Image (tube, rainbow, N blue to C red):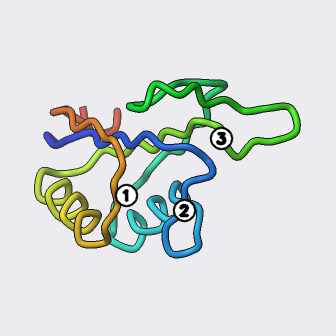
Amino acid sequence: MYGYQLTFFTQQDRTHKNRCLCDWLIEEALSMGIKGATLLTAAEGFGREHKLHFAGFFDMSDQPVEISMAVSEDTAVLFLHHLKQEGIDVFYIKSRIEFGTTRDC
């Protein structure tokens, strides 16, 4: 199957509707019927403001987070439109991919 990999980059302390943004993104993907998403945490990184974000020993709130999912073209359009309607401002990458399971090769 062909579609897109959507990858979102944020940090642990970002929120939407009083929820951690990364958790909100995962839950929205699940509620929209997306088959899977992966949340990865990073040791450090920097964003568009050129501010270094990192997981501190006592404070993990600034830890960089990446959420990735493989979706159909229609689902990519719907999900991104949903985020725009919700007022979410998050950096993302949308890459054209082929995906499936080894059972289907």
Dot placed on the residue nearer the N-terminal end, 3 or 1: 1
Residue ID for mark 3: 62
Dividing the picture into quadrants, the one containing residue 97 is top left
- Residue drawn at (51%, 75%), measured in percent from left and top? 17
Say which amino acid is labelled 3: Asp
Dividing the picture into quadrants, the one containing residue 19 is bottom right
In the picture, the quarter occupied by the C terminus is: top left
Dividing the picture into quadrants, the one containing residue 79 is bottom left
- Vertical position of residue 84 compared to residue 58: above or below: below
Query: Dot 2: within a 10 Å radius of its alpha carbon, few (fewer than 14), some, or many (20 or more) residues?
Result: some
User: What is the CA distance from the residue labelled 2 to the residue labelled 1?
Assistant: 24 Å
Residue ID for mark 2: 15
- Residue drawn at (86%, 32%), measured in percent from left and top? 57
Across and down, in percent, residue 88 comes to 34, 61
Dot placed on the residue nearer the N-terminal end, 2 or 1: 2
In the picture, the quarter occupied by the N terminus is: top left
Q: Is mark 2 on a helix, strand or loop?
A: strand
Q: In this view, does 84 lie to the left or right of 42?
A: left
- Residue drawn at (29%, 63%), measured in percent from left and top? 83
In the foreground, 28 or 11: 11
Across and down, in percent, residue 101 comes to 33, 38
- Residue drawn at (53%, 28%), measured in percent from left and top? 51
- Vertical position of residue 41 compared to residue 88: above or below: above
Q: What element carries label 1?
A: loop
Q: Is mark 3 on a helix, strand or loop?
A: loop
Q: Is residue 94 left or right of residue 21?
A: left
Across and down, in percent, residue 61 comes to 70, 46
Q: In this view, does 95 lie to the left or right of 8?
A: left
Residue ID for mark 1: 35
Verify CB contact (< 8 Å) between mark 2 and mark 1: no
